Image (tube, grey):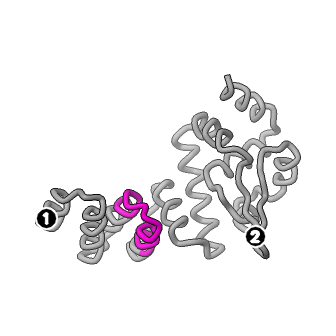
């Protein structure tokens, strides 16, 4: 019932406002600069007025996100895979244009099925390892291998698998 209530609340929005909300559901958290690049800057005030997004400020930095995680779950569940891919590609392009965080850029590129630079993927994997997200780091290193990252990507992937205690896969990867 809660999901139905949230869906009703989102369905009552104008098309442009709904599209902006979907974009935020895929791209959150995002900066106002990235929001402008995504073409949703004009809808932010309306979304805030409806209580659908929250803007947090930390000194000179502002971050936009949905006001509740359930909004994102409901919106993403209602999107087609192609719509999610389209929004992820737009998000990746906006992050690249604004010099966004390499980890977020690599994740957005993977979600949009975009060819990523192996160096970017390996840098992002290192950042994922720093925050102990070993599964994400492994995913990124596997993508780096697929993108032609060579021996450096293979070794990085083996390290990630090691930290996940997937020792048989480490041996198999290094044997290959």
Residue 176's tag is 1
**Residue 148 sits in which quadrant?**
bottom left
Q: Pointers 1 and 2 in contact (CB under 8 A)?
A: no
Image position, residue 146 (x, y; %) = 31, 63
Q: Main secondary structure of the magenta part?
A: helix
The residue furthest top is 1
Screen quadrant of the N terminus: top right
In this rendering, position of residue 146 left or right of residue 16: left
- Percent x, y of residue 60: 78, 76
- Residue underneath mark 2: 58
Identify the mark nearer the N-term, 1 or 2: 2
Residue count near mark 2 (Cα–Cα under 10 Å), binned few <14, some 14–19, many ≥20:
few
Look at 46% across and 71% down and name the residue there.
Answer: 127
Tell me the residue at 61%/50% (across/down).
26
On screen, residue 106 versus residue 138, left or right, reads: right
Q: Position of residue 55 (x, y in %)?
A: 78, 58
Q: Is residue 94 above or below residue 78?
A: below
Is label 2 in a helix, a strand or a loop? strand
First to last magenta residue range: 123-138
């Amino acid at each position: 019932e809660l999901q139905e209530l949230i869906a009703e609340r989102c369905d009552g929005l104008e098309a442009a406002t709904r599209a902006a909300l979907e974009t935020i559901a895929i791209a959150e958290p995002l900066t106002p600069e990235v929001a402008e690049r995504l073409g949703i800057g004009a809808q932010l005030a309306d979304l805030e007025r409806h209580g659908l997004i929250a803007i947090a400020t930390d000194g000179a930095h502002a971050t936009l996100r949905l006001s509740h995680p359930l909004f994102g779950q409901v919106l993403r569940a209602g999107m087609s895979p192609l719509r999610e891919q389209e929004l992820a590609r737009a998000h990746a392009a906006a992050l690249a244009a604004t010099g966004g965080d390499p980890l977020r850029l690599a994740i957005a590129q993977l979600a949009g099925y975009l060819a990523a630079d192996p160096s970017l993927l390996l840098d992002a994997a290192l950042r994922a390892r720093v925050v102990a997200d070993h599964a994400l780091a492994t995913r990124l290193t596997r993508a780096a291998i697929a993108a032609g990252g060579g021996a450096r990507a293979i070794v990085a992937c083996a390290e990630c698998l090691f930290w996940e205690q997937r020792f048989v896969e480490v041996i198999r990867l290094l044997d290959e």
